[in-house]
Amino acid sequence: MTLLPDAAWRHLPGLDRLLDALGAAEGDIRFVGGAVRDTLLGLAVKDIDCATRLLPEESSHRIAAAGFKAIPTGIAHGTVTALLPSGPVEVTTLRRDVATDGRRAVVAFTDEWREDAARRDFTINALSADPSTGAIHDYFGGRADLDAGLVRFIGDPLRRIAEDHLRILRLFRFHARFGRGAPDPAALDACIARANDLMALSRERIADELIKLLGVTDPAPTVRLMHDSGIFRPIIPEITADGVARLERLIARETIAKVASDPLRRLGALLPADPATAAAIAQRLKLSKAATRRLEQAAAAIDDEPRALAYRFGAQVAADLLLRGERPAEALGLDTLDGWERPRLPIGGGNLIAMGLKPGPVVAATLQAIEQRWIAEGFPDGERVAQLAAEATTQAKRPRK
């Protein structure tokens, strides 16, 4: 019998009390999903999910009786969140699918562990563990698939994709994170055959899954496979082989420059190197205004010193531009942005008017010229700015020929 290895998350304050209240001794609750999978792989666990035979109303009552706040985060689908001192724990009643349409499911509650496991997407996500004994329950060969680095649908891949079209993108994300070698042939064939089903999904769900994919350590081989297999064509046809090559180059430069990976930066590299097109795709994906603006600015291929770029666009976009640029990755100067605060030009239009310029467009144009020289010289102090202002106003006063 395989046992769940001990891990720090299993000793979080309040967890034992919660499990006791929810019937761990009676076998009414188990750890499920990512917590089990990642612990078996020796990875850090971020989210603790549990499944229970108890109905959500009973779960809520017991959670509250144990002294924790019970939040009905998804009560219609059986999910109650227990708020422990160490963080949230999701507790979901065992379920079976009654009806699915590729985007959402109608569920009914059950008391059968295998029935609940069968509705999950991949074998490696269907593992569960008894919190009292640590015994692993594996109905579909997930433990062997973990060892083999294989991401495999439970049952017929075409049927699982028909239940939820997002599983196409999830297959590739989980392969990028956990897979080794080529993906499961049946899973890949099904995803290719049903790629057009992605058009039925909301753009927000697509964007969320894509950002998660780009957040794994090295998603480039999987992204190339997705491109070559036509997965992007129904949703982001603008992604080309050149875009995949830009992504591969960016990831290599992130490693050389020793900077943290950034999914949005990686998305920008994957999209066409054209500001208007990048912005249009971001809007189509319903990204935030800030994210859209960042992708638009980072697609402009502007080269300058790190602080000059940060002054114009902010530190994030400056890093994006430098990592996507042509400077040697080991000498980008990104460390000069650590703790740097954007300075303020120590002169304004009023000063130029006091120096003899007439109010109007000439003041704005002269101030802009001063600012450009100030940036190019590395943001010198006020004395040097006064010199630049004197030179610029003298030039502005000269009659045009």
Image (cartoon, helix red, strand yellow):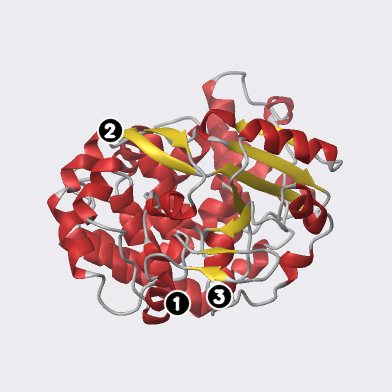
Residue 303 seen in render:
no
Q: Tell me if label 3 and label 2 are in contact, CB under 8 Å.
A: no
The nearer-to-camera label among 1 and 2 is 2
- Asked if residue 54 is positioned above or below residue 289 in the image, the reply reads below
x 56%, y 46%: residue: 312
Residue linked to disc 1: 328
Q: Position of residue 276 (x, y in %)?
A: 31, 38
Residue linked to disc 2: 101
Residue 96 seen in render:
yes
- Asked if residue 168 is positioned above or below residue 363 in the image, the reply reads below
- Looking at the image, the residue that sits furthest to the left is 193
Q: Mark 1 or mark 3, which is nearer the start of the sequence?
A: 3
- Looking at the image, the residue that sits furthest to the front is 26
- Looking at the image, the residue that sits furthest to the top is 359
Q: Judge by depth and name the residue closer to the eye, 204 or 1.
A: 1
Graded by Cα atoms within 10 Å as few (under 14), some (14 to 19) or many (20 or more), the crowding at tag 2 reads few
In which quadrant of the rendered image does the C terminus lie?
Answer: top left
Residue linked to disc 3: 40
Q: CA distance from mark 3 to mark 1?
A: 40 Å
Amino acid, disc 3: Leu
- Classify mark 1: helix, strand or loop: loop
- Looking at the image, the residue that sits furthest to the right is 67
Horizontal side, residue 259 vs residue 112: left or right: right
- Classify mark 2: helix, strand or loop: loop
Q: Position of residue 71 (x, y in %)?
A: 70, 33
Q: Position of residue 281 (x, y in %)?
A: 32, 39
